[in-house]
Amino acid sequence: MLLNLSIRDLAVIRRAELEFPPGLTAITGETGAGKTVLARALGLLAGAPADRAAVRSGSRAAVVEGVLAPPEGFWDALDDDDPAAELRELVDDEREFVVARRVPASGNSRALIDGQSARREALASLVGALVRFSSQGDARRLTSAPARLAALDAFAGPEVVVRAATLARSRRALGRLDRRIAELRERRESDERARGELESVVEDVKEASPEAAELEDLRAERERLRHADRLAEGVGAARAALGSDDGEGGAESAVGAALGAIDPLADLDPTLRSVRDDVAGAQATIGEAILARGRYLADFDAQPGRIEAVEERLSVYDRLLRRYGGTLEAVEARAE
């Protein structure tokens, strides 16, 4: 599967070219011969994190390239969610292609396939599916349960290997279905919660029947009722200044006396008629003010508990605004 491996400026290796025959290749040598660096190079192709410290001193970047030849049907056998599948459209020839990792002395590393940038995870999945390698320190990996099972399947023959691969694909497909079911259940629960929230919005707004004019009137009325004592005291003082209930004293009495004095004179001098009319109008205005004062104070006396009713209704508006938008227009738009 791995036909050729090229290493440039990685650790102690300035340049190395290795060609691999089909089957198993064992690389041996004395300590310091470069076996660890070779394993590191293969690890980079297989998605290992890049280490800038591994770049050969004085070099701009370390580069590892491998020529891979996948078996027939490899690309079609990849699962749809396998990251390696996204690389298929980047290769020039599906039967043989070049994968590479470039690790600069400064900056970010790059993963490439046939000279085009690729995700490191995708490249790792691709190389991992086509190349198996173990270094001296990875001996226990060769005795792991998956490795032993794979060896047993291979010993049992090609038919067992195919069936094992089919079983593995089926398990992965089942896993995807399980995850999809979990996603759909979560979405359904989320949709049900959202539907409940929306139904609550509509029901709350429908029940409250909010109106901008009512809200404005309620706020003004609450302010008036909160200061009822002060308002009544002020209106009472104004009534005393305008005149008493029996019509004696105050502005009403004074204007009446003025009108009585000027009315006969208007018949003697027509130029005083406009003055008489103004005084008469003032008397009428004061009279209306006195009557309005009486009605105003009567309203306070006739509405025991009104402040509680206003506060309760305003609390409905406050709850709507707090929950659903901050303004009455936003609340109505959301309900719509």
Image (cartoon, rainbow, N blue to C red):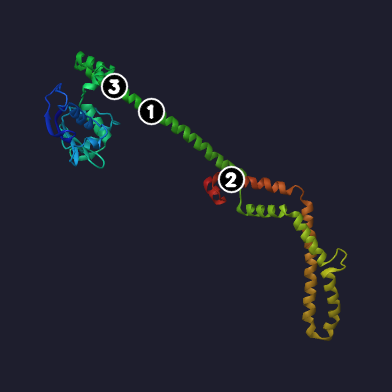
Q: Earlier in the sequence, mark 3 or mark 2?
A: 3
Q: Is residue 304 above or below residue 1?
A: below
* Label of residue 168 in the image: 3
- Residue 147 placed where, x, y %? 25, 18
Q: Position of residue 302 (x, y in %)?
A: 78, 52
- Image coordinates for residue 237, horizontal then vertical, percent: 80, 62
Instruction: Tell me: 307 left or right of 17.
Output: right
In the displayed structure, 34 sits above or below 62; it is above
Q: Which mark is residue 194?
A: none
Q: Residue at x 63, y 52 (%)?
A: 215
Q: Is the C-beta separation of discs 3 and 2 under 8 Å?
A: no
Query: Could you tell me residue 293's position as x and y percent?
Result: 78, 61
Residue denoted by label 1 = 179
Between residue 202 and residue 64, name the one nearer to us.
64
Residue 320 tag number: 2
For badge 2, the amino acid type reads: Leu
Q: Nearer the viewer, residue 120 or 263?
A: 120
Q: CA distance from mark 1 to mark 2?
A: 39 Å
| Residue drawn 86% across the image and 68% down it | 249
Tell me the CA gap for discs 3 and 2: 55 Å
